[in-house]
Amino acid sequence: MSFKERLIHSILFEIMLITIFTFALKYITHQDTTKVFTLVISLSIIAVLWNFIFNLIFDKYVTGDREKRTFKVRSIHAILFEISLILPTLPLIASSLKIGLLEAFIMDIGFIIFVLVFTVVYNYIYDHARLSFISKV
């Protein structure tokens, strides 16, 4: 995947998650929309940067056609990414929402479970849509 394609892939992914998580976090925490949106944007920036780096590393070790990756490979990819993302996001969630680390951890785990499912589905659809688009060009 080229730099431009990887950038589009990441931006689309984050826009969808920002929208979902802003509404979900607002509903769950009853916090001010601006505060929640700021937190979600901060988490998104961290995730985009790490996503780019993580995928470069992952693609060096898992080669071949992306659209031929198995469900197992996609699941391992998503799990490793999400686990590695906890370290920088946990303290940010706790401090932004003024909650304890345990509460932030539980919230982060809920987000991770959702994102794991979303990541697998998003990447599967994206890769096949990309292949369909490229084959028509």
Image (tube, rainbow, N blue to C red):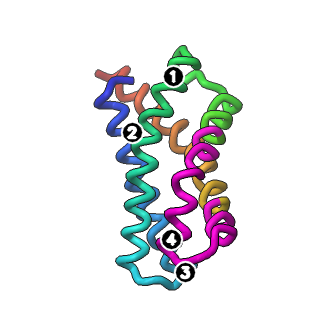
On the rendered structure, is 128 left or right of 109? left
Residue 136 highlighted magenta (yes or no): no
Mark 4: secondary structure? helix
Q: Looking at numbered disc 1 in the image, what kind of residue is underneath it?
A: Asp
- The image position of residue 17, as x and y in percent, is 46, 57
- State the residue position of label 2: 9
Residue for point 61% across, 61% down: 108
The Cα atoms of the two marked residues, 4 and 3, are separated by 14 Å
User: Residue 15 location in percent, x, y?
Assistant: 38, 55
Query: In this rendering, is residue 125 above or below 47?
Result: above
Q: Quadrant of the C terminus?
A: top left
Nearer the observer: mark 1 or 2; the answer is: 1
Residue picked out by circle 4 = 95
Among numbered discs 1 and 3, the one appearing first in the sequence: 3
Residue named by callout 3: 29
Residue 105, image x, y percentages: 66, 63
What is the crowding at mark 4: few (fewer than 14 residues within 10 Å), some, or many (at least 20)? few
Q: Using residue 7 as the reference point, say whether residue 31 is left or right of it.
A: right
Horizontal arrangement in the rendering, residue 79 relative to residue 19 (left or right): right
Spatial CA span between label 2 and label 3: 30 Å
Instruction: Report the side of 95 relative to 112 (left or right).
Output: left
Quick one: label 4 or label 3, which is nearer the N terminus? 3
Range of the magenta residues? Answer: 80-108
Whole-number angstrom distance, CA of label 4 to CA of label 1: 34 Å
Main secondary structure along the magenta-highlighted residues: helix
Q: Earlier in the sequence, mark 1 or mark 2?
A: 2
2 or 4: mark nearer the eye: 4
Query: Disc count in the image?
Result: 4
Distance from disc 1 to disc 2, alpha carbons, whole Å, reads 14 Å
Please tell me whether residue 55 is drawn above or below residue 44 in the rendered image.
above
Q: Residues within 10 Å of mark 3 (few under 14, many from 20)?
A: few
Cα separation, mark 2 vs mark 4, equals 30 Å
